[in-house]
Image: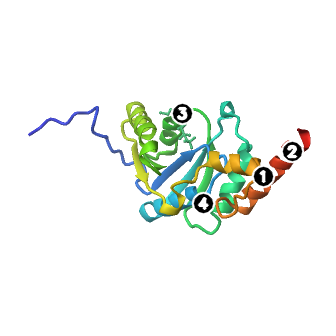
């Protein structure tokens, strides 16, 4: 019988939850595309934690509390969703939470390279981790937080792409930028 290779085979321990998954991201801001991924994740895992990376180095447009509030609003009424935040390595966060499933959304082939590297690098640091890639509905394949920010901050319309709170906060930021220029 073939010998199991401990570096490629996850060791499952009873302490880790098979019911829970973490959906990490910067979420600056959380969009309806992200919500679509959460809905799909809930079909597979009853408990999904949306974990916001604090990430001050990336200079997010929204504060951590704003990003969390937008996620809470966007996922209102979805049973099994928790909103949390983390700083530092994702593997440390999931290990500490006793979770081994990480959800990531893949919109197009262009997302794959970075996601594949990240999934394998995470696995190198925590062999039990499994990354589950989910595809959003076709309508969201072109949607990204970066484009939403860019369009809204230049005065464009992002209704139907993000929650009303995100839309309002983006409008406030756009007006502030206009006033100070
Ligand atoms: O939405 P994003 O910005 O694409 O999410 C990327 C995120 C937050 C999942 C990734 O940058 C991350 O996990 N950062 C935490 C630090 C870390 O663990 N880095 C090593 C990744 S291999």
In the image, residue 12 lies at what x, y percent?
Answer: 33, 44
Left or right: 177 as drawn, with respect to 130 = right
The Cα atoms of the two marked residues, 2 and 4, are separated by 27 Å
Q: Name the residue under label 2.
A: 178
Discs 2/4, front:
2
Mark number for residue 155? 1
Count residues near mark 2 (Cα–Cα under 10 Å), then give few for <14, some for 14-19, many for 20+. Answer: few
Look at the image and tell me whether residue 118 can be seen. yes
Q: Mark 3 points at which residue?
A: 89
Count residues near mark 4 (Cα–Cα under 10 Å), then give few for <14, some for 14-19, many for 20+. Answer: many
Q: Mark 4 points at which residue?
A: 32
- Ligand 1 within 8 Å of disc 3? The answer is yes
Q: Residue at x 62, y 53 (%)?
A: 83
Count residues near mark 1 (Cα–Cα under 10 Å), then give few for <14, some for 14-19, many for 20+. Answer: some
Left or right: 34 as drawn, with respect to 11 = right
Answer with the quadrant where ligand 1 appears in the image.
top right
């Amino acid at each position: 019988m073939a010998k199991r290779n401990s570096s490629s085979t996850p060791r499952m321990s009873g302490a880790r939850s098979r019911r829970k998954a973490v959906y990490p991201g910067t979420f600056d801001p959380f969009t309806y595309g992200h919500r679509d991924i959460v809905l799909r994740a809930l079909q597979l895992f009853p408990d999904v934690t949306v974990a916001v990376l604090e990430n001050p180095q990336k200079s997010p447009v929204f504060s951590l509390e704003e990003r969390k509030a937008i996620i809470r609003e966007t996922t209102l009424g979805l049973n099994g969703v928790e909103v949390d935040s983390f700083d530092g390595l994702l593997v440390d966060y999931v290990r500490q939470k006793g979770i081994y499933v990480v959800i990531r959304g893949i919109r197009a082939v262009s997302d794959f390279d970075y996601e594949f590297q990240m999934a394998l690098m995470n696995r190198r640091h925590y062999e039990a981790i499994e990354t589950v890639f989910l595809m959003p509905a076709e309508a969201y394949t072109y949607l990204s937080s970066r484009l939403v920010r860019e369009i809204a901050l230049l005065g464009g319309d992002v209704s139907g792409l993000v929650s009303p709170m995100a839309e309002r906060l983006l409008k406030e930021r756009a007006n502030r930028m206009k006033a100070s220029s």
